[in-house]
Image (cartoon, rainbow, N blue to C red):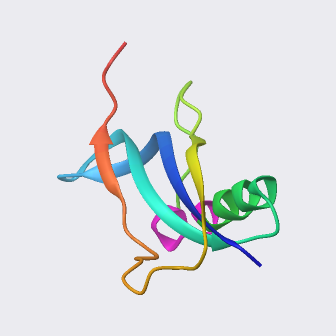
Amino acid sequence: MPWFRCLVEGENFPLTRDGRPVLLGFFTTRWVEADSVGEAELSVVGLIRNDPAFTNMRKTGDATPMVYVRRIDPLSNIPDEAPGEGFTFFEMSAA
């Protein structure tokens, strides 16, 4: 089964920063093994949805948390140094 490197972006995730609630977005890269690009996309979204970092989140106000798979690259095999966790967060700008 082939491996895929997936770049994922999230928006409108209610988290606490410096003791106050904020809406954060994030970028992360995950590697998944799947039969196709479509299966890789479903798999990576499931990984993000079940990540412990988001366990206690609730929808706040009108903002709905969203996850977008921005890029999927097929790989011949998974690199030895491939991370499987972590996020780069950014504060969502006010409208």
Closer to the camera in the image, 82 or 76 = 76
In the image, residue 91 lies in the stretch drawn in magenta: no
Does the magenta stretch mainly form a helix, a strand or a loop?
A: helix
Image quadrant in which the N terminus is located: bottom right
- Relative to 15, is 41 on the left or the right? right
Seen at 45% across and 80% down, the residue is 79
Residue 13's x, y, as percent? 47, 44
Q: Is residue 91 depicted above or below 74 in this figure?
A: above
Seen at 79% across and 52% down, the residue is 38
Residue 42's x, y, as percent? 75, 57
Q: Which image quarter: residue 93?
A: top left
Which residue is farthest top?
95
Q: How many marks?
A: 0
Image quadrant in which the C terminus is located: top left
Seen at 51% across and 73% down, the residue is 52
In the image, residue 54 lies in the stretch drawn in magenta: yes
Residue 22's x, y, as percent? 33, 40
Seen at 37% across and 42% down, the residue is 24
- In the image, the segment drawn in magenta is 48-55
Residue 21's x, y, as percent? 33, 44
Which residue is farthest bottom?
80
